Image (tube, grey):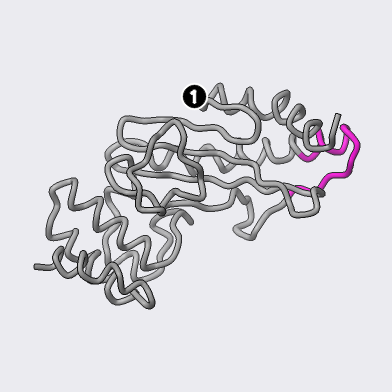
Amino acid sequence: MSEARRLNAVIAAYLAPLLRADGFKGSGRRFRRIFPDHVEIFSVQGSRYGTAFAINLGIQPLSIPDASENMPIARTITEDKCEFRRRLSESGTDQWWPYDASEDSMRIAVLAAAAVYSRVGQRMFEQFAGTDSPLHTITAEALESSSDGLHGFGSTRFRTALALSRLRYVQNRPSEAKCFAQLALKHIGGAAGYRRELEIALA
């Protein structure tokens, strides 16, 4: 069995049951939990040299386009297409779990990652459930001030403001949509192709 397949087998044995108990579905290295209004993704990313892995978390509202400008399909979207994403980390730094070619080393790494998910990852996702989700409550002012109102989820300031402007629009909250559109325009940089959409939102 190849090293990649051995790691997948260890994930299936020690991490997948924890995720399935939380309502995630999937196999291999990617799992999804689907809600009526958004999808959450848990994905294991191997390092370039196959000696460590990180865990990427993604959240995508289903009512707005994803980061590739397509309407999301909950069963197939990947975390890199989510507008709101972050790495699983206990310390706030970029956390990787190293391992060697032995199954014991892989098991130790996967169990350590599972423990971090249990301590902090579950809570990261839980904060986005329900009507008091930060996706529904954060203001443009809070996003601009760099306060961690989204608990580390997001991408660039422009993309996050654009996504929240779109979300507020479909939620029929036009004044808030305009505030986020103004913030997106402020940070538009080289993404000039979005200027017309944002100017219409401000009209």
> Label 1's element?
loop
Which residue is nearer to you in this view: 59 or 203?
203
Rendering quarter of residue 27: top right
| Residue farthest toward the right in the current orientation of the protein | 102
Q: Is residue 170 left or right of residue 4?
A: left
Rendering quarter of residue 165: bottom left
Quarter holding the C terminus is bottom left
Number of marks in picture:
1
| Residue where numbered disc 1 is placed | 23
Q: Is residue 74 left or right of residue 80?
A: left
Mark 1: amino acid: Gly
Give yes or no for residue 100 being in the magenta stretch.
yes
Residue at left offset 32%, top offset 49%: 65
Residue 28 position within the rendered picture, expressed as x and y whole percent measured from the top left? 65, 30
Quarter holding the N terminus is top right
Residue 143 position within the rendered picture, expressed as x and y whole percent measured from the top left? 34, 65
Residue at left offset 80%, top offset 53%: 49
Residue 113 position within the rendered picture, expressed as x and y whole percent measured from the top left? 69, 40
Give yes or no for residue 98 being in the magenta stretch.
yes
Residue at left offset 25%, top offset 50%: 167
Rendering quarter of residue 13: top right
**Residue 107 to residue 45: above or below:** above
Q: State the extent of the magenta-drawn residues as a range.
A: 97-109
**Residue 160 to residue 99: above or below:** below
Residue 160 position within the rendered picture, expressed as x and y whole percent measured from the top left? 36, 60
Q: Is residue 65 left or right of residue 49?
A: left
Q: Is residue 115 left or right of residue 70?
A: right
Residue at left offset 52%, top offset 25%: 25
**Residue 7 to residue 155: above or below:** above
- Circle 1: is it few (<14), some (14-19), or many (20+) Cα within 10 Å? few
